[in-house]
Image (spheres, grey):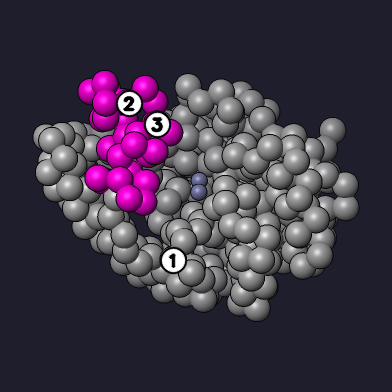
Amino acid sequence: MPLRYDLHTHSTMSDGALSPAKLVEYAVKQQIDILALTDHDTTEGVAEASLAARNRQITIVPGVEISVTWSSCTIHILGLNVDHKNRQLQQGLAALRTFRNWRAKEIGRRLEKAGIAGSYSAAREHAGGASSIGRVHFARFLVAQGHAANVPAVFKRFLAKGKPGHVSGKWASLEQALAWIHGAGGQAVIAHPARYRLNATRLRRLIGEFNECGGEGLEVVSSSHSRKECVAMAMHARRSALLASCGSDYHGPGNPWAELGKIPPFPTGCTPIWKSPRWRLYDSAQEGYPLQSGSERWPRG
Ligand SMILES: [Zn+2]
Ligand SMILES: [Zn+2]
């Protein structure tokens, strides 16, 4: 049996619905062998996930999903197998969370002006123990208040560019994000590349610059991609000699299109990122990376 990978998931430490421990528990149930926790701009959930994974048949990949501003677009870059205690990485992520929290106040202020009162404090409540308040937290409040039918509808009506709750601003640069990831020993992957709706020229430019910064992978298989998009992204990965990654981008129950571990196979011709000689396995008991690819205890598949 080949190992089952899900290399893109969220917990309550960012905008997911399950705590890191509950997420691991559910991943075991879904028969996932290798699970990356990739919360937005934080690795705070890794310790809890790793503790929950001890003595269980699952390996945690300490990860993060970094918000990047590239050519006036927000792009998400996954860092996989990072050393989450790395100082430079942590300083970078802390700055992004400061921006995220400032933005949340600003969204609240703008929605207030548009006639929706109390959204900031409600979003804060929805965020619970999360390390910062994201737009999904606002969206959940607006849905609960009956302003829109579901989260995607809130984004379209209130939070997208040109809508009353939209706040522009700058996240990390592509170079910065990749330097943090590589400095922490990790590998960088462009998350859900088809979701940004970049035309072919701009997507090639993004991939080109990512390659120049030493980026390793493209998330070819994602729940936000149609099969046609997966095939197109596989072609981009092959052409640019990038490794292929896969992830559900699971945020919690109730999103049938993004179920944990529900990951279709790669289109032909992809090299999975875990076949890379730099791929390593995190050991939850030792809280480190004692296993290098090629070692005797290295799992098959
Ligand atoms: Zn994302
Ligand atoms: Zn994500």
Provide the residue designation for mark 1. 72
- Indicate if the residue with disc 2 has its beta carbon within 8 Å of ligand 1: no
Residue farthest to the front, as pictured: 162
Q: Main secondary structure of the magenta part?
A: helix
139 part of magenta stretch = yes
Query: Horizontal and vertical percent for residue 181?
Result: 53, 68
Q: Is mark 3 within 8 Å of ligand 1?
A: no
Circles 2 and 3, Cβ within 8 Å, touching? The answer is yes
The stretch in magenta equals 136-165
Element type at mark 2? loop
Q: Which residue is mark 2?
A: 148
* Helix, strand or loop under label 1: loop
- The reply to whether the residue tagged 1 has its Cβ within 8 angstroms of ligand 1 is no
Q: Earlier in the sequence, mark 2 or mark 3?
A: 2
Residue at 54%, 59% in the rendered image: 77
- Considering only order in the chain, which callout, 1 or 3, is on the residue closer to the N terminus? 1
Amino acid on which disc 2 is placed: Ala
Q: Give the spatial CA distance, label 2 vs label 3.
A: 6 Å
Which quarter of the rendering shows the N terminus? Answer: top right
| Amino acid at circle 1 | Ser
- Report whether 82 appears left or right of 133: right
Check disc 3: other Cα within 10 Å, few if <14, some if 14-19, many if 20+.
Answer: some
Quick one: 285 or 77, which is closer to the camera?
Answer: 77
Which of the image's four quarters has the C terminus?
top right
Res 21 visible: no
Q: Is residue 58 above or below residue 100?
A: above
Residue 119: where, in percent of width, then height? 18, 37
**Which residue corresponds to the image point at 74% horizontal and 37% vertical from the top-left?**
227
